[in-house]
Amino acid sequence: MDIINPELPPYLLAHCTPADDVLRDLAAETRAAFPADAQMQISQDEGALLTMLVRLTGVRRAVEIGVFTGYSAICIARGLPPDGRLLACDIDEAFTAVARRYWARAGLDDRIDLRLAPAIETLRALPAGPPIDFAFVDADKTGYRAYYDELVPRLRPGGLIVLDNVLRDGNVLRATKPADVAIREINDHIMADERVESVMLPVRDGVTLVRKRESG
């Protein structure tokens, strides 16, 4: 989506912390092994943003909904302290088999707990209290509302939820497909939720940062 000059994306990528060999190799293998799905992988700059957000907010307990081949999980886990943990939720064994190899190569497999099950079931099995500091949601778009509704009560005050693809290549403005309608609805739901404060950023396909209020 060309919110800015379409010639600028390479410049943006050139002016953030570069991906290392692990992330570059993972991105290349993902494109080769899953060409029809490779667009699901986050970009270098979005990965750098995730790492920075986790570090800035002092995250120890993180959740990821939608792992794919593990790029974003590496970025999140790298922002955690040595005793931090990431609960990574997905249902696809082929994608996550690649993720496991690269987590091990990155030296992060001891920080990442992969749960191969519907994410909504994994979330509902968590304690009802606020054990979560940070969550990244990048999975089936029609499930975003359910994931959000399970995450917010479990998020500590001051905790952060990051939702990806909230612009849907501009289709939130003329939503007709179920995924686009679902994203438009969760965008409106967040704005009406008094438990949180939020900001939507034009990063790639749109990223919303949702912070739980101290009294939320």
Image (spheres, helix red, strand yellow):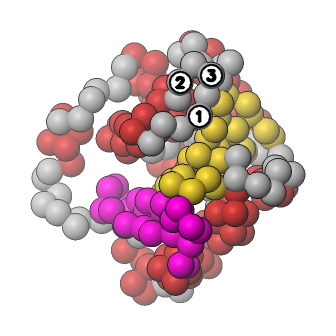
Residue 51 against residue 119 in the figure, above or below: above
Residue 179 against residue 185 in the figure, above or below: above
- Horizontal and vertical percent position of residue 130: 70, 53
User: In the image, what residue type sits under mark 3?
Assistant: Asp
Residue visible at 81% across and 50% down? 126
Residue 29 against residue 184 in the figure, above or below: above
Q: Which residue occupies the extreme front position in the image?
A: 215
Magenta includes 120?
no
User: Residue beneath label 1, please?
Assistant: 60
User: In the image, what residue type sits under mark 2?
Assistant: Pro
- Horizontal and vertical percent position of residue 34: 57, 38
Horizontal relation, residue 19 to residue 109: left or right:
left
Residue visible at 43% across and 34% down? 55
User: In the image, what residue type sits under mark 1?
Assistant: Arg
- Horizontal and vertical percent position of residue 152: 64, 63
Horizontal relation, residue 99 to residue 13: left or right:
right
User: Residue beneath label 3, please?
Assistant: 83
Q: What number is the disc on residue 144?
A: none
User: Mark 2 and mark 3 in contact (Cβ < 8 Å)?
Assistant: yes
Residue visible at 81% across and 57% down? 128
User: Residue beneath label 2, please?
Assistant: 81
- Real-space Cα distance between discs 1 and 2? 7 Å
Residue visible at 33% across and 62% down? 201
Q: Residues within 10 Å of mark 1 (few under 14, many from 20)?
A: many
Q: Secondary structure at mark 3?
A: loop
Horizontal relation, residue 12 to residue 144: left or right:
left
User: Mark 3 and mark 1 in contact (Cβ < 8 Å)?
Assistant: yes
- Horizontal and vertical percent position of residue 185: 56, 81
User: Mark 2 and mark 1 in contact (Cβ < 8 Å)?
Assistant: yes
Q: Secondary structure at mark 2?
A: loop
User: Closer to the N terminus: mark 1 or mark 2?
Assistant: 1
Q: Is residue 54 visible?
A: yes
